[in-house]
Image (spheres, rainbow, N blue to C red):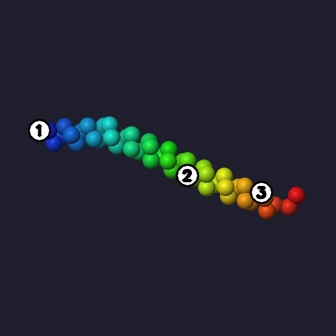
């Protein structure tokens, strides 16, 4: 009976937290990459 309880605890607690942390890390990474790209494009633009 301990197996199903551990699976439920994992599905209810660990997976949503991991999904949110993964999404936050992905957003931070994409924000950094896209901001750097925008800075480079702006620096090359004629004034």
42, above or below 8, in the image: below
Tell me the quarter of the image containing the C terminus.
Answer: bottom right
Task: Give the numbered dot on residue 35.
Answer: none
5 left or right, relative to 18: left
Q: What residue lies at 86% left-to-right and 61% top-to-bottom?
A: 46
> For residue 18, which quarter of the picture?
top left
Q: First in sequence: mark 1 or mark 3? A: 1
In the picture as drawn, the residue positioned furthest to the right comes out as 47
- The location of residue 25, given as percent across then percent down, is 50, 47
Residue linked to disc 3: 42
- The location of residue 15, given as percent across then percent down, is 34, 43
Q: What residue lies at 45% left-to-right and 47% top-to-bottom?
A: 22
Mark 1 vs mark 3, CA separation in Å? 61 Å
Mark 2 and mark 1 in contact (Cβ < 8 Å)? no
Residue linked to disc 2: 29
16, above or below 47, in the image: above
- The location of residue 23, given as percent across then percent down, is 48, 46
Q: First in sequence: mark 3 or mark 2? A: 2
41 left or right, relative to 17: right
Tell me the quarter of the image containing the N terminus.
Answer: top left
- The location of residue 16, given as percent across then percent down, is 37, 40
Mark 1 vs mark 2, CA separation in Å? 41 Å
User: In front of the other: label 1 or label 3?
Assistant: 3
> For residue 40, which quarter of the picture?
bottom right
SS label for mark 1: loop
Task: Give the numbered dot on residue 1.
Answer: 1
Mark 3 vs mark 2, CA separation in Å? 20 Å
Neighbor class of circle 2 (other Cα within 10 Å; few <14, some 14-19, many 20+) is: few
SS label for mark 2: helix
Mark 3 and mark 1 in contact (Cβ < 8 Å)? no
Q: First in sequence: mark 1 or mark 2? A: 1
């Amino acid at each position: 009976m301990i197996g199903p309880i551990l699976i439920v605890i994992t599905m209810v607690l660990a997976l949503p937290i991991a999904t949110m942390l993964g999404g936050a890390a992905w957003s931070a990474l994409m924000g950094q990459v896209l901001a750097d790209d925008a800075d480079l494009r702006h620096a090359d633009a004629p004034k």
